[in-house]
Amino acid sequence: MGQFIFRRFFWMIVVLFFISIITFTLMRAIPGGPFSREKPLPEATLALLNQKYNLDAPLLVQYGDYIGDIVLPIITTERIRPSTAEDYLVVIPLPFIAEEAALRWINFGPTYGSRSRSVNDIFRENLPISFQLGVAAMGIAMAIGIPLGVVSALNRNTWVDYMGMGTAIMGVSIPVIITAPLLQYVFGVQLRALPVTGWGTIQSAILPAFALGFVNAALIARLTRASLLQVLNEDYIRTARAKGLPERVVITVHALKNSLIPVITILGPLFAALVTGTFVVETIFGIPGMGRYFVTSITGRDYPAIMGTILLYAFILVVMNLIVDIAYAWLDPRIRFD
Amino acid sequence: MKTTRFARFLSVLLVVAVLFSAIGAISAQDRKVIVTGISMVGGDIPTIDPQLAETSASIEAINQMFVGLTAQDVTNNALAEGMATFEVTENADGGATYTFTVRQDVPWVRYNPETDAVEQLTDESGAVRMVTAADFYYGIMRGLDPRTASPYAYVPVGYINGASDFNGLVLEDGGDAAAYEQSLAELQAATAVRLVDDATIEIDAPANTLFTAYIYGLWVMRATPEWVIEEFGDLWVEAENIATYGPFALKEWAHDESMTLIKNPFWPGTAGVPQAKIDEVVFRFLDPQQQLAEYEAGNIDAIQIPLEEWDRIQADPVLSAEYVTGTNPCSYYIGFDNLEAPTDNVHLRRALSYAVDRETIVTNVTKRGETAARWFTRPDVNAAPTLELFPDLGISYDPTKAQEEFAIALTELGYSSASELQLSLSYNDSGNHGAVMQAIQQMWREVLGLEVTLDPRESATYFASLSEEAPAAYRSGWCQDYPDTNSYLYDVFFSQTTQNDTGFANEEFDQLVSQARLSQDNAERIELYARAEQILVVEEAAIIPIYWYALALMVKPNVERAPSVTGNEAYYLWDIR
């Protein structure tokens, strides 16, 4: 197992490296730059901005500098003035060298969208918010989706099944761009029971988490049902029943656990998508999360923010897939990674 | 069993939620707080650093916290007293020297969350730090310094002797950094801004114009606190570090969410920028749709109206009564590539312009209070021709003339019918530009029998392409930097300016706008500009003026909004009844 995880970590670094190259190439290939404006900036001003953000260097040098700033730790001996270009995620003071000395590591660079914030600031301040929302939505999705799928499967082709799957189809079919404003209008504007927009209180999280969770609950419910139905026809379920186990034990211990493998498979990427933020829900509910940066950084040609958000998303995705693989072994003892 | 338990869980959740929000609704009402979304969009304010600001959201916030050497009467564009009084002396070379006397009774302040009060800042010796001419000198030089890379410094650069060389000095790749610093120091010394004493600052302008004083009041030339910037670098604008001096101070900046400004009791008030009447302003960073939802829920006092909801608001008796129209100092137009076929043909350009029914566009497409434009410059800025003074100036919808001109154009271009003419209309695919372009496409089809193809492009791609190689016909807009016709006609269409993507160059036009630029008599300037507009939009038809923008707002009945023609709200004039 240890060797397996080690191997996966090695490949993760390779994958992230290739993702960074592809992203960097693609974003530089699209026309327009971070300073393209309706009111065009004079050549001289553009030259100054390009110089400030190191955009006048050859592309290979720019890429090298960027990766270097992230990967290579540096040791500074003097206090550095706060700057969006030199903002390090990891700062370890080294008082034995000099009073202000420190080891600094992981600098994702400035964001062009703000003159006082860095990409690291987005990770520090916006990511936790998206993470909270994502976890809440994930919780709702699983809390609704798995029971709904199980109940539907156990009552196959009865009215319970039709009701459950009807709800699920509705959830999958109606996009969040409809449900979110609808929830907002009913509970926020009309009933005034919950905040319309904003973040920071439990009640402000209810609507967005529900809007986001419901769509995914429907997805999980359908998958759970299909998978459980398949498992219920397996020989070992018949064996379990034949040896006289109570139905409850047959379902929970033998059927459900095995039927969750396909569900777990999608939970990984789903979790990565939810916790790194969703543009639509965050925009509609005015949540200061990270999802907006995925879209605005591309339209604004905010190169460091594009790189940062994509790499972070890729990182979480790869880690989640690893966790999913490990979860397989626990769910199905036949699976081995040696 | 499981489903009923879940239903019970849901209902408990709902009850808890209702209880929570009931608690939240009980809040202090004794402070006058205005929550606003005007000029704001979802996301964050890019900066509140005066030397780095360029978006309207940034400028709006900066105007409440930093006051310029000069200020503007927001009701009529006249100059008003800001942080200084000034005298102008004409120089022998045709230039002018502006001598500013800066007020001595304004302290630097910061909000202290522990005492919940705005406090005066002190220096090492404990004395209150007052805003001085030196702070303005520092702010101006910081804006001009090429290392600051200010995106707006290019505007004042043209109005300060020597500033252009200083601001334009770029360190060549692999260049000698020490020599660069040395040259910068020399060029800064050669820039004609002189700090005479703590109260006096002098600026030499290359020309004596009526609008230079407005330029010196621009945000990029405001005083900024050197000692704070030296210590906190890029982070000096955060609430815990910043120092301001205007009618409001920064209380909280919740990035990507909101910004709260609190009244600065130490601002003495001037004729142009009086003391604030309200205690706090909260900017909510929301897109117009979300602003409206919060407005209807009673949580925001003033918003901009999303186009999609306009018809519903008009139909609603309560909401429509709260509609307020304001000034958005911009002009919307279609530009032509004046240099390449087929749009190098003046008859074709004129035919296309006559065929656009601007009234229909503003009443049926954009709908929110815009004015059909007959020429480029907004009539409400200084020295601009007005519709009352010049009822026949410019161009308007005239299908007969359009068809006549089109016939000539086809002959000259060598086409036997309109179907042979290939033309596309490019635009940035955002907002409602698509709807306006479709309307124009339809008008050209109906009046001229011309079928143009629409060419929507992604915004950044589009704007980059305009500067490189203008499409044959393209959507554009211009927002003024200062309220004078010079900011329109000279800054955009003088043949030597960088903003002119059309390639339009006309000797008489250049001569007219250059003469009007230096004239000290606004009545004479209006006449000169009227003639220039006639050349631009009729005789040469270099562009098609479409409309003059408006601001469509909704303001709660208990809030007294101060009308503003500047395009920025002056919250220090707002009040709550």
Image (spheres, rainbow, N blue to C red):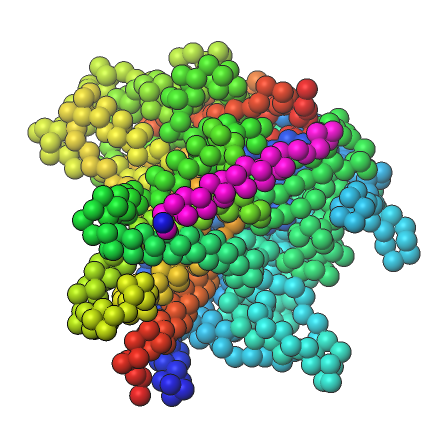
State the residue lying farthest toward the left: B416
Image point (43%, 21%), residue name:
B313
Of A93 and B3, nearer the camera is B3
Of B251 and A50, nearer the camera is B251
The answer to whether any part of residue B70 appears in the image is no
The answer to whether any part of residue A105 appears in the image is yes
What are the residue bounds of the magenta stretch? B2-31
Residue B373 point in image, percent of width and height: 40, 22
From the viewer's perspective, is residue A25 above or below residue B447? below
Residue B532 point in image, percent of width and height: 44, 25
Q: Within the image, what quadrant is residue A180 found in? A: top left
Image point (24%, 62%), residue name:
A228
State the residue lying farthest toward the front: A244
Please state the total of marks drawn on the protein image.
Answer: 0
Image point (22%, 26%), residue name:
B442
B8 in the magenta segment: yes
Which secondary structure class fits the magenta region best?
A: helix
Of B304 and A45, nearer the camera is B304
Image point (63%, 52%), residue name:
B144
Of A202 and B287, nearer the camera is A202
Residue B158 point in image, percent of width and height: 58, 44
Name the side, left or right, on which B152 lies relative to B468: right
B521 in the magenta segment: no
Name the side, left or right, on which B161 lies relative to A228: right
Q: Quadrant of the C terminus of chain B?
A: top right
Q: Within the image, what quadrant is residue A39 found in? A: top left
